[in-house]
Image (tube, grey):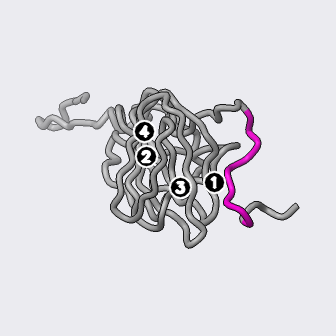
Amino acid sequence: MAGKKMAGKKVVKNVAKNAKRPQPPTTKTEGAIRAGNGRYSFDLGTLNTIDAGPGYSTSHGPVVEGDRIQIGLMRMPKGTGSRPHSHPNEQWIYIMQGTLESEVAGVKSRGGVGSLIYIPANAVHSALATPEGDVVFLTAKDMSHGIAGRATDGSAAGPAYAPGFAPKR
């Protein structure tokens, strides 16, 4: 702060007000929200959504990134999901609505509300929302990589679909 004397009193000017405010660091995932720098609380239901697996998954939702952890509230429409893919960060999936059929490193499972799925770093995995209803899940990943991975076949040929759920052409 800078100051000057005026009629025997020191008047303080706030020079920081005129200084450029520090911007939060960029995000690893385009469209994600960066936490910190005064942003510590988030209403996930009101944030913009992003595609969590462009070219291989139907998962979409808001993503918030911190320094070491990223959180996403994802929706996977019924009868759709992700083709086999991997990413260099480990991941946790907590199912809040619906039933999710998944495969992680060759191990198949089916989980409903309250189920927790662990995906080790670089493990090939896939998921499919059952035809009965959409799946909503909270996901957490470390920040060694962004939210999206890469399909194991290297293509962006689209997401996985249960029989009868693929878009009509």
Q: What mark, if any, has residue 119 been given in the picture?
A: 4
Relative to 118, residue 164 above or below:
below
Sequence order check: which comes first, mark 4 or mark 2? 2
The residue tagged 2 is 64
Place residue 70 in its image quadrant. Answer: top left
Q: Residue furthest left?
A: 8
- The three-letter code of the residue at mark 3 reads Gly
User: What kind of element bears circle 3?
Assistant: strand
What kind of secondary structure does the magenta stretch mostly adopt?
loop
User: What kind of element bears circle 1?
Assistant: loop
Sequence order check: which comes first, mark 2 or mark 1? 1
Place residue 95 in its image quadrant. Answer: bottom left
Pick the front one: 5 or 126: 126
Relative to 52, residue 149 above or below:
above
Q: What stretch is highlighted in magenta?
A: 155-164
Q: Nearer the viewer, mark 3 or mark 1?
A: 1
- The three-letter code of the residue at mark 1 reads Thr
User: What kind of element bears circle 2?
Assistant: strand
The location of residue 33, given as percent across then percent down, is 47, 45
Distance of mark 3 from mark 4, alpha carbons? 19 Å
Q: Which residue is drawn at 48% across and 47% down?
A: 108
Sequence order check: which comes first, mark 1 or mark 4? 1
